[in-house]
Image: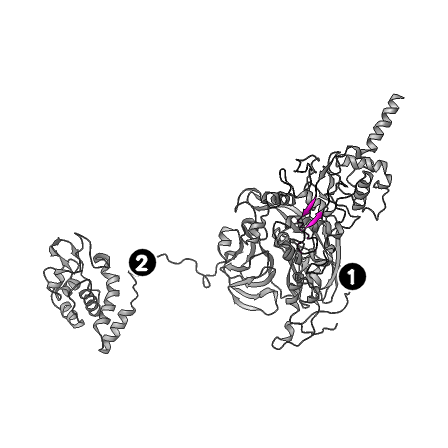
Amino acid sequence: MRAGLALVMFGLMLALPAAAADYAALPGGSFTSVLPADGKAAAAQVAPFRLRTEPVTNAEFLAFVKTHPEWRRDRVARILADQRYLSHWADAETLGSEALPRQPVTRVSWFAAQAYCESEGARLPSWYEWEYAAAADATRRDARSDPAWRENLLAWYSRPSNAPLPDVGGAPNAYGVRDITQPVWEWVDDFNALLVASDSRDQNDPDVLKFCGAGAVSLQEKENYAVLMRIAMLSALKAADTTNNMGFRCAKPE
Amino acid sequence: MSRSPLLVVAAAALLTLAACSGKPQAAAKTDATPAANAPAEHVTRGDFGPPQGEPIHAVLTSPPHVPPPVNRNYPAKVIVELEVIEKEMPISEGVSYTFWTFGGTVPGSFIRVRQGDTVEFHLKNAPDSKMPHNIDLHGVTGPGGGAASSFTAPGHASQFTFKALNQGIYVYHCATAPVGMHIANGMYGLILVEPPEGLPKVDHEYYVMQGDFYTTGKYRQKGLQPFDMEKAIDENPTYVLFNGKEGALTGDNALTAKTNETVRLFVGNGGPNLVSSFHVIGEIFDKVQPEGGTVAQHNVQTTLIPAGGAATVEFHTDVPGSYVLVDHSIFRAFNKGALGILKVDGPEDKTIYSGKEVDYVYLGDRSEPNLQAVSTAAKAHAAGTLTKDEQIAAGKQLFTGTCSVCHQANGEGLPNVFPPLAKSDYLAADPKRAIEVVLHGLQGKIKVNGHEYDSIMPPMNQLTDDEVANILTYVLNSWGNPGGQISKEEAAKVRAAPAPTTASQGH
């Protein structure tokens, strides 16, 4: 009986991973994004919000799948996640050697990421929120003018991604947020609106980032190109797509 | 098979612009405008109708190899499957770099189709890629050269189809932002669109492509070197390479041919920044099709290959040996790696190239003075118009060649060894005696300007009477000497006279 109760409690703990997730409070404010709010130069306004301090892990996502079986890889609707969805897991409810519990979860679609965040009483961060949080380094809230900050982003791009992902739990930035620019790309709520939102850009072509135009025009500030490469990555995806190194974290209002 | 000779002079130029203009409509077909001065056969577009026969899977090759000729007389549907792979590879000895590649190599796989072919292109981005990629083929007529239709996330594949309307050798490259970085990481290659009749047969075809690379470490600094955006923007490459690696075309990797063969090189330049002055040391290109165009140049030493451009060069091998492929912006070759070797084996042909025949000493100006003034003086003398100034000019040049070795160019001589000619009291005392000294030599003690000299001056009777007269006239009118003039006749008279007692040995 006692053992049974313990099992139930254990099950409850597994079912409520959200209770364990830490969120850091970010003050928000006026923020100079690589994507100007008006398409020209206007700063973005970021309302105060809370952001998960770590990306969602395999263990956390496994718990979610168990309580939301419609997101098992063998039951998910194909329009919500492609064939690669969680394909590195040993099976639909087992992580296995290719997916360690504390590694960030990858091969998840935007739909799945959004559903997970809802289960945590949260949502995906917007691009501006993500970019705002990622602008910090260990001591400064906006370290983007420091070449070392940019080099850090680029160094990750220039490493082949054939090695296993590290566990989450990297050094915190000034907000207490960890692992934000690496070791995974992260979904944002408005990933597919990044290119069409600023319709007043001179290019008036939503495909502009896909070819030279973006390289020539938007990347004039060389401090920005490392960030813009993330936008290019997000823009390459559809909401059901999954990739080997696209993960996510969630955000909440203040 | 209908061949419509539409004359679209500007189409090729627009193609390259289309990808980067941001205005797809710029690539729209131009109207058929007869070209005023271009022969029709050079600007024929090649829409030969719908594809015929079974679809063909294109043979792709890694550099420096080129797929076999198409060898087909009808337009076909050709399926190209190209995979983007991001991988760490050596860029130099002990130095590695994370390359982004088309097909796992830099440059990417060589693609060969026939003009008029319908190409079904599959661009696959490997699942473990970090980046999305696309492809802009300069041989495509359409927005972005295919880039718009091929933007592909990791673990995905894109398909698009184009008709190869224009023949030529074309660069393809990734055009995902930041374009420069994707190209700098090695994302370029060549696609050959053969003319309908194919290319003339040659003994060897090779694929060579130049690129510039930017690493945070110095040239040959060991270890994995990251990309350096600052250097790329400054156009200050760490490496300039053929086929993506220092040594890709040297040593055991050298290109090979035999004597008396024809070699065709498809030479591209991926950039991202530098323009190549492509040259093969010791060969003359019999034929170059600059930028892959149809009008050939002949007898070319060095051909310019623009970034994002390509050329076809052909030459015949006559003499065995190692021929060095370089970017003749030559520091790139010897200090940044832009060097390859074509090794030609076979019998020597001494009638074309002898090898080294003689090694001899060359003394330069001192033994071979420029004797222009001397011949001027000789002509003037023959014409009876010789002036003192002409004599002085001629004498100065002769003095430099013969006399200055001992008496020095300034006439000061060397203390205690060679007496001075400048402000010389010995000379001033008897200018005519100087003729004797020059022609018969001088030995024994003499006193010049208060110093005793006891050495030997050999007779300079190899000098003609003209030359003796001119040298002495120059000396008499230089360095504070009293002036005066010596004539050829005076020199002849002294030469004919018996040697004085002061004459030196060797007379």
Q: Position of residue A148 (x, y in %)?
A: 59, 43
Q: Are marks 2 and 1 in contact (CB under 8 Å)?
A: no
Q: Nearer the viewer, mark 2 or mark 1?
A: 2
**Residue under label 2:** B363
Both labels 2 and 1 in a single chain: yes
**At numbered mark 1, what does the secondary structure look like: helix, strand or loop?**
loop
Residue at image location 12% in from the left, 53% down from the top: B452
Which disc number belongs to residue B54?
1
Amino acid type at circle 2 is: Leu
Q: Horizontally, is B168 left or right of B231 in the view? A: right
Q: Residue furthest top?
A: A2
Amino acid type at circle 1 is: Glu
Count of numbered tags: 2
Q: Quadrant of the N terminus of chain A?
A: top right
Q: Based on the displayed image, in which of its 4 quarters is residue A173 positioned?
A: top right
Whether the magenta-drawn stretch holds residue B395 is answered as no
Label 1: how many residues lie within 10 Å, few (<14), some (14-19) or many (20+)? Answer: few
Q: Position of residue A31 (x, y in %)?
A: 67, 47
